[in-house]
Amino acid sequence: MNMNLNTNEILTTTEYDMFRKISNRKITENPKLEEELLSEGQRQPILVNEKMEVIDGQHRLYYLRKHRKPVRYIIDPTANFKTVISMNTSAVNWALQDYVYSFALEGDPEFVKLAKFLDENELLSDKMVIVAGSGRRDGTAAHVVKKLKKGDYVFSNEKQLREFCKFYERVLNETKLPNKPFLQSVLWTLYTTSVFDENRMLTQLKKSKDLQRKNCY
């Protein structure tokens, strides 16, 4: 491919394998985006660097490939995730994990650790991990999230968060409660108090669950 000729031009292809992922960012289902691409077509081209690594538009590529639709894309040899953030276009629709992986790819050690934790975590929401990982006890995440989007984050509470994950897994297994962000947040706030007792909390949750069952009959 002649990069001098194609740089910053809008190109079209159905050769999906030419695009490369540069992180382990999870593809979360977005039915609204899928429907929009099918009904209105691809309005915004995918942005790739000179290695054909997708900088912006991984979800668009996912759905276009799924439905075997042509992909419109732009090659920018200097593009990186900071480019997208500074453009303030696609970045406004980014999930928190997109910011995490973008700064991790820049080599920031705190974001590298956080990205690894997110990849390994299957129970807790990304927001929960980010807030708890920063050492915050309560559910007011706005300040943490705002700083994270600017690349300012310290994953200072990894050890306690891993211990909480083990406890939370016990909660789900032994109580059969549904895994909800609200439950995660409440239990985390209680877990980080000095008087918290795991076994006592599990007993209380089980009793509450049993009482709910009885009230249903």
Image: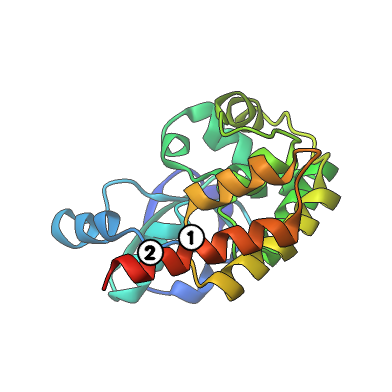
Residue receiving disc 2: 212
Comparing 32 with 78, the one in front is 32
Comparing 36 with 172, the one in front is 172
Describe residue 73's horizontal placement relative to residue 186 as left or right.
left
Describe residue 88's horizontal placement relative to residue 159 as left or right.
left
Look at the image and tell me whether residue 132 can be seen: yes
Q: In this picture, is 170 found above or below 159?
A: below
Quadrant for residue 116, please give it.
Answer: bottom right
Comparing 43 with 124, the one in front is 124
The answer to whether the residue labelled 1 contacts the one labelled 2, judged by CB atoms less than 8 Å apart, is yes
Residue type indicated by callout 2: Gln
Dot 1: element: helix
Q: Position of residue 58 (x, y in %)?
A: 47, 58
| Number of marks in picture | 2
- In the rendered image, the quadrant that contains the N terminus is bottom right
Residue in the image at 41% along x and 67% along y: 62
Residue type indicated by callout 1: Ser
Dot 2: element: helix
Quadrant for residue 143, please give it.
Answer: top right
Q: Position of residue 28 (x, y in %)?
A: 44, 61
Tell me, for residue 208, which label it has, or none.
1
Q: Position of residue 78 (x, y in %)?
A: 64, 40
